[in-house]
Image (cartoon, helix red, strand yellow):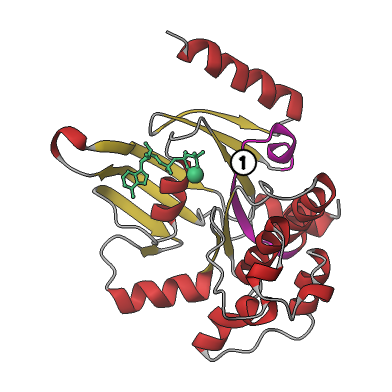
Amino acid sequence: MSTQAEKTREAPEGGRPAARARSLTKTYGSGEAAVVALDSVDVDIAAGRFTAVMGPSGSGKSTLMHCLAGLDSVTDGRVWVGDTEVTGLDDRRLTRLRRDEIGFVFQSFNLLPTLTALENITLPMDIAGRRPEPGWLDTVIDALRLHDRLEHRPTQLSGGQQQRVAIARALASRPRLIFADEPTGNLDSRSGLHLLEFLRRAVDELGQTVVMVTHDPVAAAHSDLVLFLADGRIVDEMSEPTAGAVLERMKRFDTVRQP
Ligand SMILES: Nc1ncnc2c1ncn2[C@@H]1O[C@H](COP(=O)(O)OP(=O)(O)OP(=O)(O)O)[C@@H](O)[C@H]1O
Ligand SMILES: [Mg+2]
């Protein structure tokens, strides 16, 4: 890795987190039916680093991503993106913050069926009246191997292709902060590896910040730090993860969780 990339990773923005939460609690429903999806979570997402989020199904991973990205309201606690407190922003400012700073790859792709792949990719920028940086859109489309699918509509695409379109849409405006909820879940191993290497380069060479939910220890091994969630809390973390170490850690969860 180059010296510049090292510098970018160490102190990209003076050490200020790209996003953080304090006592973040999210409850769905009320009374007896209430589900505590996040239970007073404190987290700092380091800027210019690649963070993976892991944990059993229902542990709150998607909810954490949505709350950090200002896509979902919180029940209690506070969330910041950079210096901006997300909790308490009015709708207009929240929309602008999401549009200008954040790319989000949803666990369900949320593509618009009436638009082509390319139109879906550029939709957020079209709405904002912005043009993609010359070269960047091509770089993204190349990395995701979508060149020959740009005129297709979502129903004409395979699940993995739809996922790659959703990823391209999140990356197209070159946001500083990228959230990706199981982005490799529907990809074959080669496409998955391409994507992980691309996200890794976005962090190392462009100083972007990536937060990725994954169930796959091999995917998590591309990150700098893994956060482990269980029952709406961050219960552990691992720096410089390897697939083997992550797998071992996850096995321990299974043992602990058995009645
Ligand atoms: N809109 C909602 N209404 C009610 N409960 C919800 C809602 N969204 C999530 N939950 C509940 O909150 C908890 C956390 O859900 P979340 O989607 O964050 O889990 P997850 O860790 O992303 O799981 P998975 O790995 O299956 O995607 C779960 O118990 C879920 O049933
Ligand atoms: Mg989820």
Q: Tag 1, which secondary structure? A: loop
Is the residue marked by circle 1 packed among few (<14), some (14-19), or many (20+) residues within 10 Å? many
In which quadrant of the rendered view does residue 28 lie? top left
Nearest to the observer: residue 133 or residue 138: 138
Residue lying at the far front of the rendered structure? 156
Residue 128 position within the rendered picture, expressed as x and y whole percent measured from the top left? 50, 86
Residue 127's place in the image compared with 149, above or below, is below
Question: In the image, 18: left or right of 245?
Answer: left
Give the answer, above or below, for where 114 lies relative to 242: below
Q: For the point 43% across and 46% down, which residue is it?
A: 64
Residue 211 part of the magenta-drawn span: yes
- Whether residue 184 sits left or right of residue 41 in the image: it is right
Q: Does the magenta stretch include residue 190?
A: no
Residue 203 screen position, x and y as percent: 70, 57
Q: In which quarter of the image is residue 122?
A: bottom right
On the rendered image, what quadrant is the C terminus found in?
Answer: top left
The three-letter amino acid code for the residue at tag 1 is: Thr
- Residue 84 screen position, x and y as percent: 38, 65
Q: What stretch is highlighted in magenta?
A: 206-222
> Who is closer to the viewer here, 24 or 16?
24
| Image location of residue 156, percent across then percent down | 70, 70
Q: Residue furthest top?
A: 259
Residue identifier under label 1: 214
Q: Which residue is drawn at 27% across and 47% down?
A: 77
